[in-house]
């Protein structure tokens, strides 16, 4: 069943329930109060009949004359004067015990059987006590209730039909923007990811949905472009050492080659093979860092202790590096330094940043600062190296991209992209500030909320 049909059906059902409750409410109170006036007329006749028949008064004849002259006789009206001491009753019907209990309590009693009404009361006279009961029919009240019942039933069905039509129009109107979004999304394919949905002005859910789709398309387009660039760059980076290896092998296989030429060729082959291995290892790291992390081991790690481990690892690769860790902004609460992370990956990410700082700082000071704000833990790596040209900063996290002033340094352009993927895996972010010839600061921000 489509959403429009569900909305229409639900709207009709809710309308039917509301109309049923309203009709029942009207019917109940109409039924309760429709005969109130008729009962009062009977009660007035009870009092008049008691005055005329039970009490000796000179005005009784006047009361009788006024009743006959001014009080219309009700349909099937009958008058009963009953002595409570007698066991036999002159009534045309056996009345319930509750009727007589009210009379015994000194109250005016009422009773209705179908269209026949009874009203009675106990009166005490000098000759004894008597019960006066007046009965009559009220065909007009019943006729009015029957007419009301017909009107309510007809109105109920007409209202259901109207609510169904209104619900259908309402659902069609409300879902038209959604249908337009569906049509627009169906037109977008891999070949035209640049297309976007029209976002109407406003903050309603449809505008938010369209904007969400556009944001998703932006990410998809970026991912596709990154993938294409990655494949292109990876192919180029892999092809270069393979070409060199192939050329050196052909050179070494030529006859009458001197021993030192063969040794030089084999050394070149070894270097290119190591380069190829490094590239493949980096590519594997990039691929693994793109996982969602759910199947990888996560553990609680003290980040200040991890920085000492990273410092020791980097010092082994760059023995002459000058690394200092600044703990001046450490929080008093140790829990603010503990994160639930994949230790191997997060260590690799931070190590890449610190290694780059040492490599491009020419043995100048590299400072590592750690700070916790209660919601975010940040690690800032600052060097006094060659810096990054402003035109290169926006591309520095692209795989295999190297800044224009790094030609004298060995590298493959996969360290920072790998670090970025790992930090994103931990729901963090990386910011970079650099000035050519002065130095670079890379700040890693990680949320303290457990992943």
Image (cartoon, helix red, strand yellow):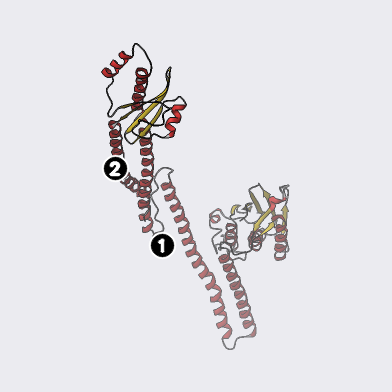
Q: Position of residue 67 (x, y in %)?
A: 29, 18
**Rendered residue at 37%/58% (across/down):** 186
Q: Position of residue 240 (x, y in %)?
A: 54, 72
Left or right of 100 in this view: 285? right
**Which quadrant, please, contains the N terminus?**
bottom left
Foreground mark, 2 or 1, reads 2
Q: Earlier in the sequence, mark 2 or mark 1?
A: 2
Task: Name the foreground residue: 444 vs 105.
Answer: 105
Task: Name the foreground residue: 16 vs 379.
Answer: 16
Location of residue 138 by image quarter: top left
Left or right of 25 in this view: 384? right
**Rendered residue at 62%/77% (across/down):** 270
Q: In the structure shown, which secondary structural element does the residue marked by tag 1 occupy?
A: helix
User: With respect to residue 174, does 317 lie above or below?
Assistant: below
Mark-to-mark CA distance, 2 and 1 = 51 Å
For this orientation, the residue located farthest to the top is 58
User: With respect to residue 63, does 295 lie above or below?
Assistant: below
Residue position marked by numbered label 1 in the rendering = 190
Task: Name the foreground residue: 315 vs 123.
Answer: 123
Q: Position of residue 160 (x, y in %)?
A: 32, 44
Residue 158 numbered tag: 2
User: With respect to residue 14, does 58 lie above or below?
Assistant: above
Q: Position of residue 294 (x, y in %)?
A: 58, 62
Task: Name the foreground residue: 54 vs 329.
Answer: 54
**Badge 2 density bin: few <14, some 14–19, many ≥20, Cα 10 Å:** few
């Amino acid at each position: 069943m489509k959403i429009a049909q569900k909305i229409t059906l639900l709207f009709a059902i809710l309308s039917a329930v509301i109309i049923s409750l309203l009709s029942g409410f009207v019917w109940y109170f109409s039924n309760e109060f429709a005969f109130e006036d008729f009962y009062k007329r009977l009660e007035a006749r009870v009092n008049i009949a008691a005055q005329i028949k039970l009490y000796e008064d000179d005005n009784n004849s006047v009361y009788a004359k006024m009743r006959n002259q001014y009080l219309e006789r009700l349909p099937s009206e009958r008058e009963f004067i009953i002595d409570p001491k007698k066991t036999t009753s002159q009534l045309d019907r056996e009345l319930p015990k509750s009727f007589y209990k009210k009379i015994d309590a000194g109250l005016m009693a009422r009773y209705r059987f179908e269209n026949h009404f009874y009203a009675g009361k106990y009166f005490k006279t000098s000759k004894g006590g008597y019960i006066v009961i007046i009965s009559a029919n009220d065909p007009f009240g019943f006729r009015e209730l029957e007419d009301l019942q017909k009107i309510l039933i007809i109105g109920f069905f007409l209202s259901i039909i109207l609510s169904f039509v209104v619900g259908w129009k309402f659902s069609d109107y409300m879902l038209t923007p959604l249908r337009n979004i569906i049509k627009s999304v169906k037109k977008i394919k891999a070949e035209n990811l640049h297309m976007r949905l029209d976002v109407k002005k406003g903050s309603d859910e449809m505008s938010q949905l369209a904007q969400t789709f556009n944001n998703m398309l932006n990410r998809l387009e970026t991912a596709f472009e990154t993938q294409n660039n990655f494949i292109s760059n990876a192919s180029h980076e892999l092809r270069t050492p393979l070409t060199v290896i192939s050329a050196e092998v052909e050179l070494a296989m030529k006859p009458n080659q001197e021993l030192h030429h063969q040794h030089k060729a084999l050394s070149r082959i070894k270097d290119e093979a190591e380069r190829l291995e490094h590239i493949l290892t980096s590519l594997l790291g990039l691929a693994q860092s793109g996982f969602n992390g759910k199947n990888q081991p996560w553990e609680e790690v003290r980040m200040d202790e991890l920085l000492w481990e990273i410092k020791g690892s980097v010092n082994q690769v760059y023995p002459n590096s000058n690394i200092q860790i600044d703990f001046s902004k450490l929080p008093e609460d140790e829990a603010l330094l503990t994160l639930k992370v994949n230790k191997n990956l997060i260590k690799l990410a931070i190590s890449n940043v610190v290694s780059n700082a040492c490599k491009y700082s020419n043995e100048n000071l590299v400072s590592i600062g750690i700070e916790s704000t209660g919601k975010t833990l940040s690690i800032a790596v600052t060097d006094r190296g060659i810096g990054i040209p402003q035109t290169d900063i926006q591309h520095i996290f692209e795989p295999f991209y190297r800044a224009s002033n790094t030609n004298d340094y060995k590298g493959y352009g996969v360290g920072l992209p790998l670090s970025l993927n790992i930090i994103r895996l931990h729901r963090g972010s990386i910011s970079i500030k650099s000035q050519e010839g002065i130095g670079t600061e890379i700040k890693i921000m990680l949320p303290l909320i457990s992943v």
